[in-house]
Amino acid sequence: MSEAVRACLIIIGNEILSGRTHDKNLPYLAEELNKLGIRLAETRVIPDIETTIIETVNECRAKFDYVFTTGGIGPTHDDITSPCVARAFGVEIELNAQAHELLKSHYENPADLNEARLRMAHIPVGAELVQNPVSKAPGFRMENVYVMAGVPMIMQAMFQGIKHQLIGGRPMVSRSVGGYIPEGTIAKVLGEIQHDFPDTDIGSYPFLREGKLGTTLVVRGEEAKDVDLASERIRAAIIEQGREVIEDSGAVS
Amino acid sequence: MSEAVRACLIIIGNEILSGRTHDKNLPYLAEELNKLGIRLAETRVIPDIETTIIETVNECRAKFDYVFTTGGIGPTHDDITSPCVARAFGVEIELNAQAHELLKSHYENPADLNEARLRMAHIPVGAELVQNPVSKAPGFRMENVYVMAGVPMIMQAMFQGIKHQLIGGRPMVSRSVGGYIPEGTIAKVLGEIQHDFPDTDIGSYPFLREGKLGTTLVVRGEEAKDVDLASERIRAAIIEQGREVIEDSGAVS
């Protein structure tokens, strides 16, 4: 397999770690990055604590090709991502003229652009803005770190605006084969198929449907030919065991 | 605030990072731990890669009071959590007699307990089993690290069996106050309330409902009195701005 382009997602917010809010940004980002030939290689969920944010950003930006953060760029006291990212890069945070204009254009009544909302125009020195078509308050990019909103609708709009900047490798091709066969019954031959196709990743995911145990096998790889051949071997193995192939969903991300 | 008991969840599995499977264990564990007075302080989602699992387990078990892992303890080639945890602790993995008996009792036909399934009875030397009332194949504990299944139903049953072993601090008390008031409008006074109640955490979560912007404010802390007083201040602040308080859901986790 060629050297993959690897990304890390840092989900910032006490509300995720308390279980109050269920994150929806990881699956979205994973699938979008995959289309660009970038692997989501790790995700961290961290609280709104300054030292934790700074340390995590610095560790991850050194380790991965791209880092995406979500959350903590709103107007309230618990929105501390922007100053923390500034500190991670050793720069100041400043009232960004372009971000200021965006917010001015968004609030018809100048009084609504209060001190709290102006915080959303304070951006690390040297950052490039990430546009927010939904509610104007921008995200930003510092080197390989993209700082985005936590609200999924806004995060998705921001990502659509920056994805052309990202340089990926070859996208992963994926095939899914399901069968009413327990994982442990197909495990041995699956290990052999994995061994024969080392450039693919074969994942095995058991399920229970209408009272019957089954397994979905997902083959992923950069070479469509390898992925197809490995999938065919799995299909054949299920049939050889006298079991029903229930699904071949073709390409999935 | 007293020194909190802190836990870390390590979610192991390519299927989570590819976006294929949406994790359900984080919110469950967060809420269950909170009842025990333990904070979920960080979560990592990592791929089925040996070095990553070993490094992450070793980093997190040194940093947090408790570590919980989910995923990667099934019978297939991509289930590598157990040997990786053994390596993290510098011990061998062995056929555990107790785990072997559990599996033997589960498979009526001895031929079904094949080589692949026997892998599920291979447990690090010195580990204590975590019972699996659903499908028998156990998890295990090594020191402060609990290794559990990824399938939510099994993970939850395993957790219910081990939670009496966990020693927590004071549980967090939480109150939620909602209002049809934009975040940026209440942000300033919210910052003041947070300042006056430093032992609470006040989170601010905007929403859009029936076309109206609103915010849910969540106050969390160990002292119910502080949490109540801070919540009352927030209620009063919403009313003072001529806005509607839409909800006071009382205790939420």
Image (cartoon, coloured by chain):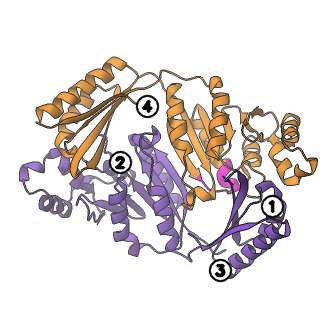
Chain colours: A purple, B orange
How far apart in space, not on screen, are marks 1 and 4 (Cα)?
42 Å
For this orientation, the residue located farthest to the top is B225
Residue under disc 2 on the same chain as residue under disc 1: yes
The amino acid at mark 2 is Cys
The residue carrying mark 3 is A224
Say whether residue A149 is left or right of residue B104.
left
Q: Chain of mark 4?
A: B
Q: Which residue is mark 1?
A: A186
Camera-nearest label, 3 or 4: 4
Q: Residues within 10 Å of mark 2 (few under 14, many from 20)?
A: many
What residue is rendered at 69% in x and 40% in y? B147
Q: Are marks 3 and 2 on the same chain?
A: yes
Is residue B50 inside the magenta stretch?
A: yes
Q: Earlier in the sequence, mark 3 or mark 1?
A: 1
Calculate the distance from the C-alpha at mark 3 to the C-alpha at mark 2. 42 Å
Q: Earlier in the sequence, mark 3 or mark 2?
A: 2
Q: Earlier in the sequence, mark 2 or mark 1?
A: 2
Q: Nearer the viewer, residue B158 or A101?
A: B158
Residue carrying label 4: B253
Q: What stretch of residues is rendered in magenta? A: B46-54
Q: Amino acid at mark 1?
A: Ile
